[in-house]
Amino acid sequence: EAGVTQFPSHSVIEKGQTVTLRCDPISGHDNLYWYRRVMGKEIKFLLHFVKESKQDESGMPNNRFLAERTGGTYSTLKVQPAELEDSGVYFCASSQGPRGGDTQYFGPGTRLTVL
Amino acid sequence: RKEVEQDPGPFNVPEGATVAFNCTYSNSASQSFFWYRQDCRKEPKLLMSVYSSGNEDGRFTAQLNRASQYISLLIRDSKLSDSATYLCVVEKTYKYIFGTGTRLKVLA
């Protein structure tokens, strides 16, 4: 069974540009999560989808970040315009649900560098 | 104060040693508990879930103390391949809250 996949693996952009990250969850997983690790800090929650609906977006840093999950399948996370402090590794995870304690499986991450 | 606290290490131990990691969490409403392993520049991978009754998986034993809000991981007979960062994770309403991780290096 294929795991969680993310694209691109790396992205280097300049401040003010736009970047879109993509996540494909494990097939059949209703729950999709975005997390971020900035250098020297712990991995932090950004948001949670159940199918196509945003269940919890309490971790989104500001309105420069927009996440979507069209049709309840893959998800995109767009940063527009990017700032220096957005640099970090963005992880996507998925879980089958519906229980909150279900294991979350992580993708390999997208390493974003904003210059 | 961080919601999940871990000693960042590094712990440098010889092969065959026993090593223990501890973690404390601040939110008593936390619902599920895990240890994840993360290799350098890779994604976190589930090592084991943690239960109050304690659970064991081969050389690994995890324990949860809800009263003290404390989670532990014991690794016996350390192998070189155990070198990694061990992440303590607490789940509340689907959201994972991570500790900063404890780095382990097993030396030959």
Image (spheres, coloured by chain):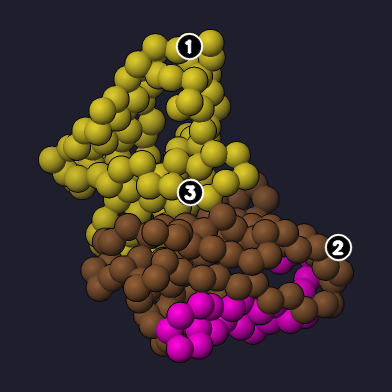
> Quick check: do tags 2 and 1 share a chain?
no
Q: Is residue B106 left or right of residue A53?
A: right
Rendered view: A16 above or below B106: below
Q: Could you tell me the amino acid type at mark 3?
A: Pro
The image quadrant of residue A32 is: bottom left
Q: Which residue is mark 3?
A: B44
Badge 1 or badge 3: first in the primary sequence = 1
State which chain disc 3 sits on. Answer: B
Count neighbours of disc 1 (C-alpha within 10 A) and say few if under 14, some if 14 to 19, many if 20 or more.
some
Q: Label 2 to label 1, Cα distance in Å?
A: 41 Å
Quote the CA–CA distance across marks 1 and 3: 24 Å
Q: Position of residue B58 (x, y in %)?
A: 26, 28
Q: Colour of chain B?
A: yellow
Same chain under badges 2 and 3? The reply is no
What's the residue at 29%, 25% (across, down)? B59
The residue that appears at 39% across and 12% down in the rendered structure is B16
Mark 2 surroundings: few (<14), some (14-19) or many (≥20) residues within 10 A: some
Q: Which SS class for mark 2?
A: loop
Element assignment for label 1: strand
- Looking at the rendered structure, whether the residues under marks 1 and 3 are on a common chain is answered as yes
Amino acid type, residue under disc 1 in the picture: Pro
Residue A87, can we see it? no
Q: What residue range appears in magenta?
A: A61-86
Question: Label 2 lies in what chain?
Answer: A
Q: Could you tell whether A39 is left or right of B71 in the image?
A: right
Residue B53 or A18: which is nearer the viewer?
A: A18
- Taking the magenta stretch, the answer to whether it contains residue A79 is yes
Q: Which residue is mark 2?
A: A115
Q: Position of residue B97 (x, y in %)?
A: 42, 57
**What residue sits right under mark 1 in the picture?**
B14
Q: Which residue occupies the foreground of this view, A84 or B49?
A: B49
Chain identifier matching the brown colour in the rendered picture: A
